[in-house]
Image (tube, rainbow, N blue to C red):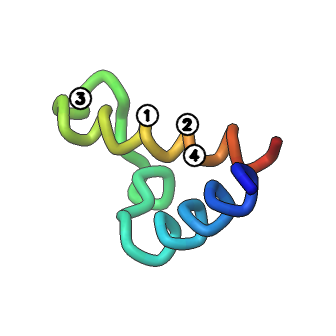
Amino acid sequence: MKIKIFRFLAKLNKAVLPSYSKKQLDLSKANKFQLAMIGWRVYVTKNALG
C-alpha cells in the first residue's frame, strides 16, 4: 500500500514539478526552495522504488 502511494506521488511529481537536471541547475547556486524540491523528489523516488 505504501509503495503504491509513493509510485503515484512519483508520477505526479514528474508531471507537475520542474526537472532541474534537464535545466542543468548548479546545486551550489540553487536557492532553498529548489533544494527542498530536489529533496522531496529524492525522498519520493527512494520510497517508490521500495
Q: Which mark is residue 43?
A: 2
Q: Is residue 39 above or below residue 15?
A: above
Q: Distance between the residues labelled 1 and 2?
A: 6 Å
Q: How far apart are marks 1 and 4 (CA)?
A: 9 Å
Relative horizontal placement of residue 25, taking residue 33 as reference (left or right): right
Q: What element carries label 4?
A: helix
Q: Check disc 1 and report the residue beneath it.
A: 39
Q: How far apart are marks 4 and 2 (CA)?
A: 4 Å
* Upstream in sequence: badge 3 or badge 2: 3
Q: What element carries label 2?
A: helix
Residues packed near mark 3 inside 10 Å, few (<14), some (14 to 19) or many (20 plus): few
Q: Check disc 3 and report the residue beneath it.
A: 29
Q: Check disc 4 and report the residue beneath it.
A: 44
Whole-percent x, y for residue 15 in the image = 47, 77
Q: How far apart are marks 3 and 2 (CA)?
A: 21 Å
Residue at point 17%, 32% (across, down):
31
Relative horizontal placement of residue 42, taking residue 45 as reference (left or right): left
Residue at point 80%, 47% (across, down):
49
Q: Which of marks 3 and 2 is in front?
A: 2
- Would you say the residues marked 1 and 2 are in contact, meaning their CB atoms lie under 8 Å apart? yes
Q: Nearer the viewer, mark 1 or mark 4?
A: 4
Q: How far apart are marks 3 and 4 (CA)?
A: 23 Å
* Upstream in sequence: badge 3 or badge 4: 3
Whole-percent x, y for residue 39 in the image = 43, 34
